Image (cartoon, rainbow, N blue to C red):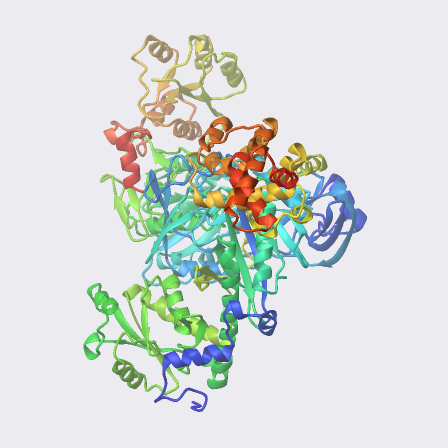
């Protein structure tokens, strides 16, 4: 084997190799990354935005939607094993085969309150929930999609067990829409309505446990074209779609109600899907790191292909070893011995310097193998040790011995795994498979995200051949009259609202809060009906309300609509609207308290204007006595400060200032 | 015409397709008042309306286009899908039992055409091996498609044909027989074969699936494995139904063909033995008998094939207020046997008495079974029961209504002599009437009761 391409043996230091390869890849932290950096790696991304609809019932049965249980709150359990079925081309889907190889026993926990026989696929579907269909169509209209003439329920296979039937019922409502971002328009591929999946409780060894409370809840999925070329643009699109969904008031909010699948690729890479990202704020970091992970894998590809002679016949070498012949003092290995685990040494030809090659911040290629061993061979981590660990778990002599065992070249890397007999075959296949993929570049996969922006392997990315018609459901026609009627409910575009707020001079830093909580309609209503200054109300909501929410706890559900009542009260009582700022903290904490009582609790007294103004001349006199400054403005501020407590609510600050000037 | 290029389309939709010259399987680009759509035109289900055209769009989903909204349409390409199940040769392993699978139709032996949703039978050993490779570890398989009918269309002619085919296979030396069957009338066929194939030296196993085999969660594969295991290895040489025990993917139950009934429209664990315990449980490794007393497998090839059936038999599900003219009509139309499904211990109202008397006089034989399913007909307890017996209705013990119907048809296929028939009806062939009902033969747990809830939570049902 060609020695010149591999790192020097004697000074090889995995940590240094990591740093070195990070440089080769040209990885830079996101904060420092510029548009040109993304252009360099050919960053491309798209979104699949999932959003739960706020309906009373689930999509295909009459169980209530939106009730959730704790893990151990269940009445019965049902077991299923998923089998791959043939695709229409007569082939098995890659994901399907992977899931089948895992030999998972799937346990579903059922709570009688939230699951019926439909959830576990023991009863065919009932008719689609019309409430959900209507809501989803309203959102489709808002996305400017071409609405289909007839809805066809389709089955989409999921072999991971997240749906007991093994498929999700889903249907397209519209295709080819668009959303406007600040600087461009992003096209939408489609919008579908579908049933939500189970929530995972645990996934240990060969058993995965799910709960079924969320299963079957109506969900929409908005899919964009991969037209976002920077992580920030991607986040902007995610936010826009989220705000658009929320602007209808038809969707659920809160943890897990909106989830994004983030598709990322780089030039020469492939589409990788980061699943179920709940927080949009994580999107930039996740997509940034994924773009560079792919870029790193392409660097690995190049190195391997330069180095290996015969890539077509590349194979791992493996051999069982006896722990007595080695010095394997590492607790996970010794623990495994108790359960009669076998210990296997593996030689990876040409992989020196690859195992410790940078992939993500703090992660190396060896992690890619370990992640797959967990998911496919069901070996809990730590599931391997290797010759390029930053801090070796076992003494290095072991690897020297293993190299001798395989008569390995200096160009090779070594792994040791320990596993029950029945998992070894899959484990070795998994290692070889992942290494072979390294010669090809970036494997198509779905990945699970972490809050630090890194991801791990979740599943093989399913192909397009996993859809087929649902023979249990009849097509649903969507007549023009019905669509026209729904159009009447559709709110104005988020972009129009955005522009209106700008026109009103509402500060931009309030927009996210306003759209996230769908408060624009409230602002509009207050402005139109109560004729209050839009800038004031926008700031009141985007700053004051946000602050109060963050610093006080409400004793009851605080309904935002009540803010209208607050202003209406102030107007009706001919009180100054500034008073609202003092009232809000109390109002937010005790939403049931009447406004009179709130005023009492903040020690507000209604006073005639004249009475307040009558004190001005006295205060002017007093200021001359204390004479902190000769400046008239200082005097004015001091007087205003003195009068503010009694003045707020009784006289507008502008009027007060004018009065001070005149007096 | 050699080929239907507008499969399933009719009326307005057909007119539009013809007008724009777009065929099924054509790539179409459609301009509508709701925007533009592109995709492959799919065949339309015969029963769906004639206002829509079905398209498969590039993402794999199907959508319908309202023909009223179409402004223009163009065929831009054409690619006909040929959906075929891949065949792999079923391996033969020395030492494994030889099992014959008879196909009759129904979900266990079908596959979905992914594009149209149409059901395609998957049946040859090669197809089955492609779908359930584990079968090759259980037995050496040969198959024969006898008919392809849905469960509800199985009837006397099919029972007779099956019985004769089974007889031939036994003669030829097969180790076990599996019959793939739709589940709706699995228990009717179970009873019919019990009567028509007597004294079999080998297991005869009826199997179906409640979820079609195109679903990842289908029970078909496991049911097939259980059935093949039973046919190949079991010592129980009876006509049995093999289906899920619990709804979980766990073990199967072997029910006697005469005591089994489908009890839920869609559950996987729908088949239950009524008034007794099942014969055995089965998993992929072994058969564990529950009943100690069963007909054992033999080496010889003797079997009695009795393929008789008269279709002049009917079943009457009694309801309060039933009018006598129903019975009169049946008699006038030449029916020779009536199985009543009566209330409680086996009752019908007095209003029917004259009609019953008239039927008896005309030589019609009548048997009483129960709507309660569990328990015995007891016609001595009340006067009404005694009256009815006097008028010619014969109580049939704890024979299930469907079983009584099948048996009466089988008996009338052999003789019209009421005494002969009575003898056949009341002499059990394989426990269609039992002499005693064990306490655990009737178990319907009531949900909500604490101890039942405890049980359900502990044992995955």
Q: Is residue A162 left or right of residue B275?
A: right
Say whether residue A320 is left or right of residue B49. left
Image location (x, y in percent) of residue A428? 36, 71
Looking at the image, can residue A71 be seen? yes
Q: Nearer the viewer, residue A640 or A34?
A: A640
Q: Position of residue A74 (x, y in %)?
A: 34, 40
Residue A608 is drawn in which quadrant?
top right
Asked if residue A129 is positioned above or below residue B421 in the image, the reply reads: below
Front residue (pair A143, B233): A143
Q: Which residue is painted at 49% across and 55% down in the image? A: A277
Instruction: Answer whether residue B279 is visible to the viewer in this image.
Output: no
Seen at 42% across and 83% down, the residue is: A350
State which quadrant residue A2 falls in. bottom left
**Rendered-image quadrant of the C terminus of chain B:** top left
Q: Position of residue B342 (x, y in %)?
A: 40, 18
State the residue in front, A149 or A575. Answer: A575
The relative height of residue A405 versus residue A572 in the rendered view (above or below) is below
User: Residue A151: x and y, percent?
Assistant: 63, 43
- In front: B279, or A350? A350
């Amino acid at each position: 084997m060609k020695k010149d391409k591999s790192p020097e043996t004697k000074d090889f230091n995995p940590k240094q190799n990591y740093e070195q390869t990070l440089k080769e890849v040209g990885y830079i932290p996101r904060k420092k990354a510029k548009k040109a950096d993304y252009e360099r790696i050919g960053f491309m991304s798209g979104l699949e935005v999932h959003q739960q609809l706020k309906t009373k019932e689930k999509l295909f049965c009459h169980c209530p939607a939106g009730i959730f249980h704790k893990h151990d709150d269940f009445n019965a359990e049902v077991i299923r094993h998923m089998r791959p079925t043939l695709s229409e081309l007569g082939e098995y889907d890659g994901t399907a085969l992977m899931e089948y190889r895992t030999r998972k026993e799937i346990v579903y926990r059922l709570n009688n309150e939230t699951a019926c026989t439909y959830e576990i696929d023991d009863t065919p579907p009932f008719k689609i929930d019309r409430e959900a269909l209507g809501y989803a169509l309203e959102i489709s209209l808002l996305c400017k999609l071409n609405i289909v003439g007839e809805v066809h329920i389709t089955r989409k296979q999921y072999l991971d067990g997240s749906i007991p039937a093994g498929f999700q019922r889903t249907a397209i409502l519209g295709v080819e829409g668009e959303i406007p971002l600040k600087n461009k328009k992003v096209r939408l591929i489609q919008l579908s309505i579908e049933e939500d999946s189970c929530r995972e409780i645990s996934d240990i060894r060969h058993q995965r446990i799910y709960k079924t409370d969320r299963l079957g809840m109506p969900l929409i999925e908005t899919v964009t074209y991969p037209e976002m070329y920077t992580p920030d643009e991607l986040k902007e699109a995610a936010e826009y779609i989220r705000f658009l969904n929320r602007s209808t008031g038809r969707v659920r909010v809160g943890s897990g109600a909106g989830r994004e699948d983030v598709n990322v690729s780089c030039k020469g890479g492939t589409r990788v899907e980061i699943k179920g990202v709940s927080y949009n704020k994580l999107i930039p970091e996740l997509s940034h790191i994924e773009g560079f992970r792919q870029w790193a894998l392409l660097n690995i590809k190049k190195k391997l292909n330069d180095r290996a002679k015969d890539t077509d016949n590349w194979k791992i070498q493996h051999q069982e070893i006896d722990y007595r012949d080695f010095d394997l003092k590492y607790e996970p290995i010794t623990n495994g011995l108790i359960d009669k685990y076998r210990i296997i040494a593996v030689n990876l030809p040409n992989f020196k310097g690859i195992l410790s090659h940078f992939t993500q911040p703090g992660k190396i290629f060896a992690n890619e193998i370990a992640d797959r061993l967990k998911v496919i061979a069901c070996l809990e981590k730590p599931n391997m040790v290797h010759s390029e660990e930053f801090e070796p778990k076992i003494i290095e002599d072991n690897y020297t011995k293993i190299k001798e065992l395989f008569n390995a070249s200096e160009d090779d890397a070594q792994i040791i795994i320990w596993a029950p007999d029945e998992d070894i075959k899959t484990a070795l296949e998994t290692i070889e498979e992942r290494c072979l993929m390294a010669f090809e570049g970036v494997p198509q996969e779905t990945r699970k995200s972490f809050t630090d922006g890194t991801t791990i392997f979740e599943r093989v990315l399913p192909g397009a051949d996993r859809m087929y018609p649902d023979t249990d459901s009849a097509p649903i026609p969507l007549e023009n009259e019905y669509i026209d009627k729904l159009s009447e409910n559709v709110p104005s575009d988020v972009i129009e609202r955005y522009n209106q707020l700008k026109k009103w001079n509402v500060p931009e830093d309030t927009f996210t809060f306003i759209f996230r909580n769908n408060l624009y309609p409230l602002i509009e209503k207050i402005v139109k009906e109560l004729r209050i200054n839009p800038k004031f109300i926008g700031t009141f909501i985007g700053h004051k309300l946000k602050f109060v929410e963050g610093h006080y706890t409400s004793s009851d559900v605080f309904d935002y609509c009540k803010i209208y009542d607050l202003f209406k009260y102030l107007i009706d009582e001919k009180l100054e609207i500034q008073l609202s700022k003092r009232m809000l903290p109390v109002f937010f904490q005790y939403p049931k308290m009447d406004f009179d009582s709130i005023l009492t609790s903040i020690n507000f007294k209604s006073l005639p204007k004249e009475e307040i103004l009558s004190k001005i001349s006295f205060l002017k006199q007093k200021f001359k006595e204390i004479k902190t400054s000769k400046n008239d403005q200082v005097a004015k501020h001091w007087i205003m400060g003195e009068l503010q407590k009694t003045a707020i609510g009784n006289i507008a600050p502008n009027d007060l200032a004018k009065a001070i000037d005149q007096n | 015409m050699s080929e239907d290029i507008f499969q399933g389309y009719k009326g307005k939709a057909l007119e539009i397709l013809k007008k724009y010259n777009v065929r099924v399987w054509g790539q179409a680009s459609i301009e509508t008042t709701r925007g533009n759509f592109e995709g492959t035109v799919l065949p339309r289900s015969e029963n769906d309306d004639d206002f829509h055209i079905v398209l498969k769009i590039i993402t794999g989903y199907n959508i319908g286009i309202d023909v009223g909204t179409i402004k223009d349409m163009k065929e831009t390409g054409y690619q006909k899908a040929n959906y075929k199940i891949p065949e792999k040769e079923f391996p033969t392993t020395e030492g494994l039992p030889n099992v014959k699978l008879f196909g009759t139709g129904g979900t266990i032996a079908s596959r979905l055409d992914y594009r149209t949703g149409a059901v395609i039978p998957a049946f040859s050993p090669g197809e089955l091996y492609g779908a359930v490779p584990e079968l090759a570890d259980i037995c050496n398989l040969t198959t024969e498609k006898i008919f392809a009918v849905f469960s509800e269309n199985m009837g006397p002619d099919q029972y007779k044909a099956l019985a004769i085919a089974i007889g031939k296979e036994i003669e030829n030396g097969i180790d076990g027989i599996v019959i793939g069957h739709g589940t709706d009338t699995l228990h009717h066929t179970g009873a019919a074969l019990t009567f028509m194939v007597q004294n079999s030296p080998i297991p005869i196993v009826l199997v179906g699936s409640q979820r079609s085999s195109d679903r990842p969660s289908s029970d078909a594969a496991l049911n097939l494995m259980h059935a093949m295991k039973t046919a190949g290895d079991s010592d129980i040489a009876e006509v049995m139904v093999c289906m899920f025990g619990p709804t979980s993917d766990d073990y199967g139950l072997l029910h006697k063909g005469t005591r089994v009934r489908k009890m839920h429209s869609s559950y996987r664990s729908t088949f239950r033995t009524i008034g007794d315990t099942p014969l055995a449980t089965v998993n992929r490794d072994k058969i564990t008998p529950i009943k100690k007393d069963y007909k054992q497998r033999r080496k010889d090839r003797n079997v009695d094939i009795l393929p008789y059936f008269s279709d002049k038999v009917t079943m009457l599900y009694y309801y309060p207020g039933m009018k006598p003219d129903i019975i009169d009509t049946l008699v006038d139309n030449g029916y020779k046997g009536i199985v009543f499904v009566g209330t409680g211990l086996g009752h019908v109202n007095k209003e029917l008495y004259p009609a019953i008397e008239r039927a008896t006089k005309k030589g019609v034989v009548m048997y009483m079974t129960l709507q309660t399913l569990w328990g015995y007909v007891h016609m001595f307890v009340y006067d009404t029961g005694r009256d009815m017996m006097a008028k010619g209705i014969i109580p049939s013990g704890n024979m299930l209504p469907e079983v009584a119907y099948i048996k009466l048809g089988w008996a009338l296929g052999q003789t019209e002599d009421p005494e002969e028939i009575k003898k056949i009806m009341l002499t059990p062939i394989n426990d269609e009437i039992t002499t005693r009902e064990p306490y655990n033969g009737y178990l319907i747990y009531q949900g909500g009761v604490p101890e039942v809830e405890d049980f359900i939570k502990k044992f995955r049902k």
